[in-house]
Image: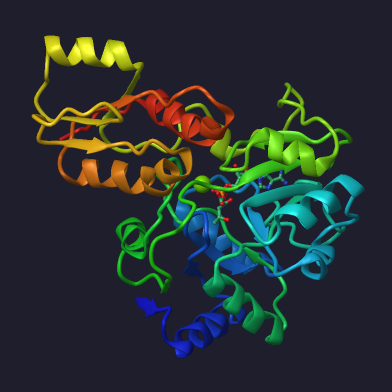
């Protein structure tokens, strides 16, 4: 059921449902999340069931502010506090040591917990009301079935879970790809998942270099090689190879998403020149081309530059999944 975010009663209804242990899909500035109160393992268990996600994959706990974060963290190391001061509320998740006995199911049983304070006004109004009802944290993964493209609109969420799911409709998500994740739980900060924040922005605020994940780094499900997959086969091609391939063959059901203009193609979508604008529309474009019946989506590889890291990461995972349609 869609709850129109423009009406204050919708926030009230969503907050009460969450406080009562039910699932509600909520808008954030990055993507929609499938939320449950983080302090009730039974509520959180419904998230794993609905998503078809393995129960040992940890979820992000969404909080209003540092006070909320302290409820779930054993301690907040100085580097985490510096990153929070710079980017919260916003598209940054911090992994820190978890307070003992708190949000065990949400953390997938790990000794750490992922914390994020979203900036979306509707998410914040909802969390404020939840706080008044005694709920400090909302565990929420992206509101899609395991391995699928994250939803950036309320109707995407309904497409994933059907009409019975409560969805607080906050319109289009302005960032469009999931938050950057920095692990602050093991000394030097590690960038586990790139988002729209660039490594240099993060490092400037952290006051120290960010490491790349090594073999000891936790395996986030959003970082599995084959993830974010539409049903169509996705191929990522550099500008010239794409041009060459298109001059040689145009298979049936071909869609193209590129900065280069290919006017003659019925399923061509223009990729914006800016990384932020591309992130905003990326998942909606993949879903739209899928829904239009595309069998293959050929995508022009993003340009060089760290501001494209988040988009490049999602596109290479979608291409790695390479799952042909079965119909
Ligand atoms: O933008 C976002 O981050 C969105 C919105 C809804 O906030 N959420 C999101 O959640 O993308 P999800 O569950 O789809 O991805 C969260 C990632 C997963 O890859 C998970 O493994 C990782 O965060 N993660 C969460 N807690 C962790 C922990 N304690 N240690 C390591 N990784 C963790
Ligand atoms: Mg996800």
Residue in the image at 66% along x and 80% along y:
128
Residue in the image at 17% along x and 16% along y:
246
User: Would residue 116 be visible to someone looking at this image?
Assistant: yes
Tell me where residue 133 appears, x and y as whole percent.
Answer: 68, 86
Residue in the image at 47% along x and 59% along y:
32
Tell me where residue 217 appears, x and y as whole percent.
Answer: 74, 30
User: Would residue 109 be visible to someone looking at this image?
Assistant: no
Vertical comparison of 294 with 140: above or below = above
Vertical comparison of 127 with 275: above or below = below
Q: Residue furthest front?
A: 273
- In the image, 54 versus 248, the foreground residue is 248
Tell me where residue 252 appears, x and y as whole percent.
Answer: 9, 25
Count of labels in the image? 0
Vertical comparison of 31 with 177: above or below = below
Which quadrant of the view contains residue 295?
Answer: top left
Q: Residue furthest bottom?
A: 9
- In the image, 100 versus 130, the foreground residue is 130
Scheme by which the image is coloured: rainbow
Residue in the image at 23% along x and 15% along y:
243
- In the image, 24 versus 188, the foreground residue is 188
Viewport quadrant of the C terminus: top left
Query: Viewed as shown, does residue 206 lie left or right of 313?
Result: right
Tell me where residue 204 appears, x and y as whole percent.
Answer: 78, 39
Viewport quadrant of the N terminus: bottom left
Query: Viewed as shown, does residue 27 lie left or right of 190?
Result: left
């Amino acid at each position: 059921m869609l709850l129109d975010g423009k009406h204050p009663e919708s926030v009230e209804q969503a907050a009460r449902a969450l406080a009562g242990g039910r699932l509600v899909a909520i808008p954030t500035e990055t993507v929609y999340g499938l939320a449950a109160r983080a302090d009730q393992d039974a509520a959180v268990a419904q998230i794993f069931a609905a998503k078809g996600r393995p129960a040992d994959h940890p979820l992000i706990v969404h909080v209003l502010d540092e006070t909320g974060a302290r409820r779930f963290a054993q301690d907040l190391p100085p580097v985490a506090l510096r990153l929070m001061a710079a980017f919260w509320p916003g598209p940054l998740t911090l992994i820190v040591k978890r307070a003992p006995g708190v949000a065990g199911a949400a953390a997938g049983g790990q000794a750490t917990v992922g914390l994020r304070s979203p900036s979306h006004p509707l998410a914040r109004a909802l969390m404020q009301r939840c706080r008044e009802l005694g709920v400090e944290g909302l565990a929420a993964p992206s509101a899609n079935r395991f391995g699928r493209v994250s939803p950036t609109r309320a109707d995407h969420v309904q497409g994933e879970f059907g009409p019975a799911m409560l969805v607080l409709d906050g319109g289009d998500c302005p960032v469009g790809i999931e938050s950057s994740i920095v692990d602050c739980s093991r000394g030097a900060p590690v960038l586990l998942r790139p988002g729209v924040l660039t490594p240099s922005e993060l490092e400037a605020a952290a006051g120290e270099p960010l490491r790349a994940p090594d073999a000891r780094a936790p395996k986030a499900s959003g970082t599995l090689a084959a993830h974010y997959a539409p049903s169509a086969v996705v191929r990522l091609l550099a500008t010239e190879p794409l041009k060459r391939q298109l001059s040689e063959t145009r298979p049936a059901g071909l869609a193209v998403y590129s900065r280069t203009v290919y006017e003659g193609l019925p399923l061509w979508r223009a990729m914006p020149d800016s990384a932020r604008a591309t992130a905003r529309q990326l998942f909606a474009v993949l879903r739209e081309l899928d829904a239009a019946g595309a069998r293959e989506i050929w995508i022009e590889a993003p340009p060089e530059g760290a501001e494209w890291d988040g988009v490049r990461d999602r596109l290479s995972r979608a291409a790695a999944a390479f799952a042909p349609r079965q119909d």
